[in-house]
Amino acid sequence: MNILFLNAGRRCELIKAFKSVLSKFPGGGLVFGSDITPLAPALKLVDKKVIFPHSSSDDFKANFIAFCLEYEVDLVIPTIDPDLIILDRLRDELAVQMPSTRLLLPNSEVVRVGADKVMTKQTLGALGVRVPKTLDPSLDSFAFPVFVKPACGSAGENARKICNQEELVGHLEVTENPIVEEFIDGPEFTVDVFCNRHGQALLAIPRKRLSVRGGEVAKGVVERNEELEGIACSIAQKLNCDSPITIQFIKQDDEYVAIEINARLGGGLPLSVAAGANWPLWILDLARGREPEVKADIKDRLIMSRYDQSIFFDMNTFEKSKPNLSGVKVLILDMDDTLYPEREFVYSGYRKVAKFCLEEFGIYVEDELCRRFDAGERGDLFSTVLKSAGINLPEHEVLKMVKLYRTHEPKIHSYADVEILKKLHAEGYTLCLISDGWQEVQQKKWQALGLDEFFTHKIFTDSLGESFWKPHPRSFELMVQWMGIDFSEAVYIADNPAKDFIAPNQLGMHSLRIKRYGSVHGNEYYTGPETEPEFEISSLTELKSMLKNES
C-alpha cells in the first residue's frame, strides 16, 4: 500500500502515524510526500519526496498522474483545502487514467459545501443545525463584536473578530468575498468524524481547542460528548459523506453552533489517534476495500500540547553530483557509525555502569543514561544522573565508572552493508581503517567486530598521540605512504562533519560522508567548505556503482 501525501507541508505527526501503521500492515508499503517547495518539513520523513507545481497550475495534472503511475500510488491524501477542489474537478479523469489509485476525498457535494462558507451555512441550516446569523453591514443594525471571514478561506486566513465600525470597514476592504456574521463566544470544538464508503458515520471524536496558532490547534483535549458526537455524525450521514471529515463547532449557552466543515483530515487529528482512534489503520482498510473494525474505546480527557521542532536542510547537498571513483584502489574507513552503530557501544557501556550503580548505591540508572544520550546530552552524564537521584560522588568514584565504561567488553555488531566491503575486498580493493578515540577502547571495539582479516592496515590515531587525532592529516599521510599510492587513489568514508573530511580534502583524497539513520552525528552540519565531503551516501551499497563509474 503506497501512500502519497499531497502538499505534506508540516504534517509530520500525521505522516509518522501512517508510517507506523503501514509497517505492520499486510504487504507494507511506502509513504511519498509532495510539496511546491523542497523545504517543507514533512518531506524529511517520507520515503520519497516530489516537488509538484501548484495544484492550480496547468502542469500539475500531468506531473501528478505521472508520479502516481510510476510509483504505483494506491492512496492519495490531500492535506490542504485548495487541493480538494482541484482533485474533485479531476476526479472522473483520474479514475480513468489511474484506476488503482484511491483519493481520500468525500463526495463532490461535501467538497463544495466545505469549500464555500456561504454554502456551508445554508446546508447546515437546512439540516436543522444552528449556525451563526449572517449580517449585512449595509442593511442591518447590529452590536459589536462581529466576526468576518472570507467565503472561500482556509487555515483561518483573514478570519477575525471585529470590535468596531472603523475596524469593520478596513477589514472588509482587504478581505475577498467577505462574510459578516454574529460573533459566537464560547469554547471551540473540532470533531473528527470517521465515515465509511457507504456514507455511514462510524465514530466521532470531539477535540476541545485550548489554544490555536496559525489556524491550527496548538493545545487541545479530547472531550467526549454524546450530544455533540451525535450532531456531527448526523451531519456527515445526511451529507452521505463517504470519507473522514472534520466539523467545527462553538458551544454557546449550552448549544452547539456549527461553523465549518473540512472535507479532509484535521490538523489536530494526531490527538484523536493518540487517544485510540486509529484513523490511519481504518483509512488503509478503506483503501484496500475492506470494512474497518472501528473501535470506540477512546481515552477521554487526553491533552495534546504541541511544540516547535526544527528540521534542517543542507542546500549544498542538493547540488552535488555523484563522484567518479573509478581510479580508487584503497578504501579507508572510519569505525564508529560507519562500520557499526556507535549507540550499541554506548548502551553496552551504560549497562555495565548501571550494574555497578545498582550494586553500590541501590539505584537504577541505565534508562536515564540512555534517555539523556538520545536527547543529545554529552559530557559527564554519570555525575549528572547520580546527582538527579540525590547522590553526589567524589571525583575518584566517578572515574571508577568511566574506567568501567571504557574497559568493558562491548556487545556490538557491524552494519549489514559491511558485507559489501567484504565483496569489494575479494575483488581486489584494499580496505584500511583510520579511527579516533582512546586506543584501548577502539581496540576492544575492533576485536568485537571481527573484521581484521579484511583490513590490510589500521591506524588508531591515539597511538600517534592525542594531538594527532582528526582532523590532523598525519594518519592519512602515513596510510597513503604505506600503500604506495597517490592521495587521489584513496577514498575516506566516515560520518562526522566536524572533523572527518578536513584532512582528506586538504590532501586531495576522495571523501564520502555516510549518513545513517540514528547515527550520533547524523543531524550535524558542515561549518565551512573545508568540512564538506565530496558526496553523501546513506549506505555502503552505493560504493560499488561509484567505484565502477556506473549510473
Image: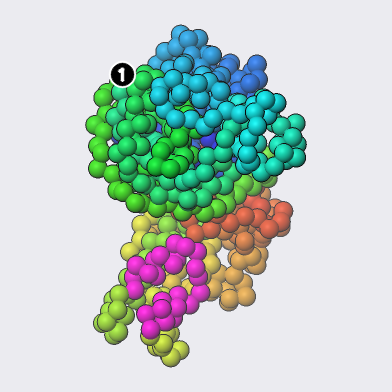
Identify the residue at horizontal 31%, vertical 18% (top origin). Answer: 198
Q: Identify residue for label 1.
A: 198
Query: Which residue type carries mark 1?
Result: His
Secondary element at tag 1:
loop
Find the magenta span and give its range: 365-390
Give the x, y percent position of residue 26: 28, 31
Q: Quadrant of residue 345?
A: bottom left
Q: Specify whether residue 371 is painted magenta.
A: yes
Q: Quadrant of residue 203?
A: top left
Q: Quadrant of the N terminus?
A: top left
Overall secondary structure of the magenta stretch?
A: helix
- Can residue 414 be seen here? The reply is yes
Q: Quadrant of the C terminus?
A: top right
Check the image and report above or below for 119 versus 534: above
Identify the residue at horizontal 58%, vertical 56% (top origin). Answer: 524
Identify the residue at horizontal 36%, vertical 51% (top origin). Answer: 302
